[in-house]
Amino acid sequence: MAGKPKQGDYAPHFEAYIGLAAEGDLKGQLLQQERDTIEVFAKLSDEQGEFRYAADKWSLKEVLGHMTDTERVMTYRLLRIARGDTTPLPGFDENLFVANTDFGRRTITELLEEFRAVRAATLALLGGVTAEELERSGTVSGNRITAHALAYVAAGHALHHLNIVRDRYLPGLA
């Protein structure tokens, strides 16, 4: 996969996520993120998975569930656009997703298994698309975006939340 997508290939609100992903081997980054995510979350007890660093923030289990849900949404969009589907795609409300799912009833192990499965599907999808397919563009939330940019959004989004877990959640558990 070529380097980072260029501005104009995605909406400005995705800049922060794309900026977090390193230039270069995106698949390698996704594999390393998977290892890092498992390393961080596997050490947590299910009780610790309920921890929130502030009353109005998601629990650690909800963060992990959100990371998985968002990767699914981004790669679904990537698939549609890479396959040439130009149907405008809607946005999604991540707060609605979390509010309507009881991630707390699940174990950290179950949530990690789901994350791994989705990440494996992401890697398989990226392994099967061509450079030409990645450059195809579509519309998401009224904005132009390429399949290539969506791959970087998925990687950067996961890293964003992993950084928040390390910086804001884990110190509160110490």
Image: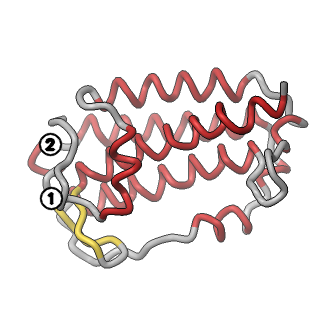
Counting residues from the N terminus, which is met first, the one under dot 2 or under dot 1?
2
The relative height of residue 68 versus residue 11 in the rendered view (above or below) is: above
Instruction: Find disc 1 in the rendering and name its residue.
Output: 136
Q: Residue furthest left?
A: 132
* Dot 1 crowding, Cα within 10 Å, few <14, some 14–19, many 20+: many
The relative height of residue 145 versus residue 59 in the rendered view (above or below) is: below
Instruction: Name the one closer to the observer, 25 or 86.
Output: 25
Residue drawn where x is 76% and y is 35% of the image: 108
Identify the coloring: secondary structure
Disc ID at residue 130: 2
Tell me the distance, in whole angstroms, between the alpha carbons under discs 2 and 1.
Answer: 10 Å
Secondary structure of residue under mark 1: loop
Residue drawn where x is 19% and y is 55% of the image: 7
Secondary structure of residue under mark 2: loop
Q: Quadrant of the N terminus?
A: top left
Q: Amino acid at mark 1?
A: Arg
- Residue 95 location, x and y as percent? 65, 66
Q: Quadrant of the C terminus?
A: top right
- Residue 136 location, x and y as percent? 15, 58
Residue drawn where x is 15% and y is 36% of the image: 2
- Left or right, 117 with respect to 10, comes to right
Q: Amino acid at mark 2?
A: Thr
Q: Quadrant of residue 86?
A: bottom left
